[in-house]
Image (cartoon, grey):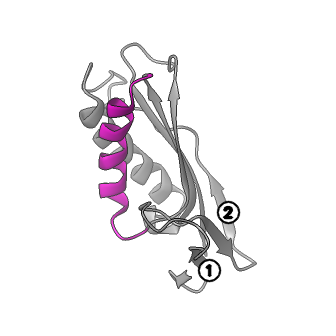
Amino acid sequence: MRRVNDRIELIRNDDLTDTVDYACAAAVTAPPRTIFTAGACPLDAEGATVGAGDYAAQAHQVMRNLRTALRGAGADLTDVVKSTVYVASGRQEDLVAAWEVVRGHFGDHDAPSTLLGVAVLGYDDQLVEVEAVAVAR
């Protein structure tokens, strides 16, 4: 177990593999302010999709947008207790390309996450989307 702050504890279990780069669970001490984000998309300020055809470029834009959304709610990436990463591909290497960028933005904050390959996402040329649940004061 690793306490992130006075609200969040990231939990690893010795009975599960230690080869993954995220915690298997997170515990939140009440009473937190819970924030649920919409899926952050790879859109620029004008609403255009960034990085058509490039999983890594889209993942970077998604994470910048996710951080902006969280900050608007009084939180940051270090307050995330769970994320879900959607990648429009059936190829594992595409999922890994997006995942590596997402993990890089989270740094040492290894909150539980789910990585999914999906058939299609909502915007033209969209390949990556990330949603998160965070707790803040």
Looking at the rendered image, the quarter that the N terminus falls into is bottom right
Secondary structure, magenta segment, majority class: helix
Looking at the picture, tell me which residue is in the foreground, 93 or 87.
93
User: Image quadrant of residue 41?
Assistant: top left
Q: Which residues make up the magenta segment? A: 90-109
Q: Residue 59 occupies which quadrant of the picture?
A: top left
**Tag 1, which secondary structure?**
loop
Q: Earlier in the sequence, mark 2 or mark 1?
A: 1
Q: Give the class, few, some or many, for how many residues have Cα within 10 Å of label 1's Cα (few <14, many ≥20).
A: some
In this rendering, the answer to whether 103 lies above or below 33 is above
Return the residue at label 2: 34
Q: Residue at x 52, y 17 (%)?
A: 119
Q: Front-most of 118 and 133? A: 118
Is 97 a magenta residue? yes
Q: Is residue 6 above or below residue 131?
A: below
Disc 2 marks a residue whose amino acid type is Thr
Is residue 130 rendered magenta in the image? Answer: no
Identified at 40% across, 13% down, the residue is: 124
Say which residue label 1 marks. Answer: 7
Query: Which residue does the image show at 36% across and 49% down from the upper left?
Result: 102
Local SS, label 2: strand
**97 versus 111 height, above or below:** above
Residue 137: horizontal and vertical position, in percent?
Answer: 61, 76
Residue 101: mark in rendering = none
What residue type is disc 1 on? Answer: Arg
Image coords of residue 27 (percent x, y): 67, 73
Image side of residue 66 versus residue 58, left or right: right
Q: Is residue 49 left or right of residue 26?
A: left
Q: Nearer the viewer, mark 2 or mark 1?
A: 1
